[in-house]
Image (cartoon, grey):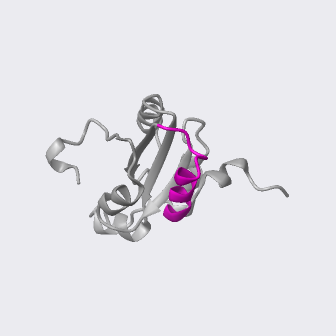
Amino acid sequence: MMPARFEQKIRSPEQCLHDMESGRLHRPLVFTNGVFDILHRGHVTYLDQAAQLGATLLVALNTDASVRRLGKGDDRPLNTLEDRMALVASLECVSLVTWFDEDTPLELIEFLRPDLIVKGGDYTMEALP
């Protein structure tokens, strides 16, 4: 059985950096992050709008341990990181999906140096890393 095509979009942070440095990814690179545990229309609309701001959309997901530290509840995430990444990667507007285990994506942002960082309207500038 052939692997699903979206699987090739799921990359480690190091693979994402390599893809950027090798020119495989077109610029400008748009970065966003989130849990995306229960993917809904609002998420999909947000991701599609973010993708329209650049040539490549990279979405970073919190690991399961990171989600638990966010205090979203003892039963969260409902879906494992692998399942959440698969759902997000299956979206046409998403170019790459990766993950981070820290409480914020700051280290990953500093590592990847995207051209544009996009967050949803429920975040204030003061709340961003």
Assess whether residue 7 is covered by the magenta stretch.
no
Task: Looking at this view, name the residue that lies furthest to the front.
Answer: 22
Q: Image quadrant for the C terminus?
A: bottom left
Residue drawn at (39%, 60%), measured in percent from left and top?
111
Q: Image quadrant for the N terminus?
A: bottom right
Task: Looking at this view, name the residue that lies furthest to the right.
Answer: 1
- The image quadrant of residue 115 is top left
Asked whether residue 74 appears in the rendered view, the answer is no
Q: Which residues are magenta?
A: 12-27
Q: Please say if 118 is above or below 53.
A: below
Residue drawn at (36%, 63%), measured in percent from left and top?
67
Asked whether residue 32 appears in the rendered view, the answer is yes
How many numbered markers are drawn? 0
Residue drawn at (39%, 71%), measured in percent from left and top?
65
Q: Position of residue 62 (x, y in %)?
A: 40, 60
Q: Position of residue 110 (x, y in %)?
A: 33, 58
- The image quadrant of residue 93 is top right
Assess whether residue 19 is covered by the magenta stretch.
yes
Q: Classify residue 129 as left or right of residue 22.
A: left
Task: Looking at this view, name the residue that lies furthest to the left.
Answer: 126
Task: Looking at this view, name the residue that lies furthest to the bottom.
Answer: 65
Of residues 44 and 75, the one nearer the viewer is 44
Q: Position of residue 126 (x, y in %)?
A: 14, 47
Q: Please say if 64 is above or below 56.
A: below
- The image quadrant of residue 49 is top left
Of residues 129 and 88, the one nearer the viewer is 129
Q: Classify residue 111 as left or right of residue 82.
A: left
